[in-house]
Amino acid sequence: MKVHPLGFGRYQRNASISAVGKETAQPEPGSTTTTHVDGFAAGSTETYLMVELKISIDRDQKALAKVMDAIIYAHHYEEPVIFVREDWASRADYNPQSDNPNRWWNNGKGLPDRID
């Protein structure tokens, strides 16, 4: 958040985090794992829990460079797996007074339960 607000429409700090899954790797000789984990044999498979984090930023090379540098600096892996894609994204008309019956303020259900 120090390098980009991750804005999407009228909202800041937007991100999507997947359910917990697994990731695996086979560290090669000279890797950080084989260097710092006593007794780890190069070529052995290691498996860890992981989540996938998705963010959206405007198409701006300087902003992307700042975000990538911040992620690489903050991540606990020396080489985090990061995919950069160019996608189309939805945009609403941002009418908080909309009478659309499917909107949470009109559907009688309210907001989904917050978890944090």
Image (tube, rainbow, N blue to C red):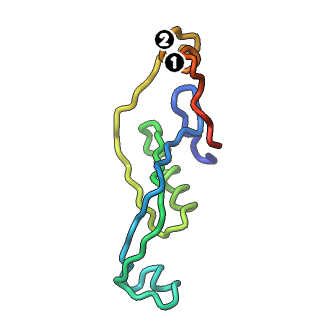
Q: Are marks 2 and 1 in contact (CB under 8 Å)?
A: yes
Question: In the rendering, at what x and y percent does residue 36 appear?
Answer: 52, 84
Viewer-proximal residue among 21 and 83: 21
Residue 25 in the figure: left or right of residue 13: left
**Label 2 neighbour load within 10 Å: few <14, some 14-19, many 20+:** few
Task: Say which element carries label 2.
Answer: loop
Residue 12 in the figure: left or right of residue 81: right
Q: Residue at x 43, y 44 (%)?
A: 61
- The quadrant the C terminus occupies is top right
Q: Residue at x 52, y 50 (%)?
A: 66
Residue that extends furthest to the bottom in the rendered view of this protein: 39
Amino acid residing under circle 2: Asn
Q: Quadrant of residue 60?
A: top left
Viewer-proximal residue among 79 and 42: 42
Task: Say which element carries label 1.
Answer: loop
The residue under label 2 is 100
Amino acid residing under circle 1: Arg
Q: Which mark is residue 103?
A: 1
Q: What separation in Å lies between label 2 and label 1 (alpha carbons)?
A: 6 Å
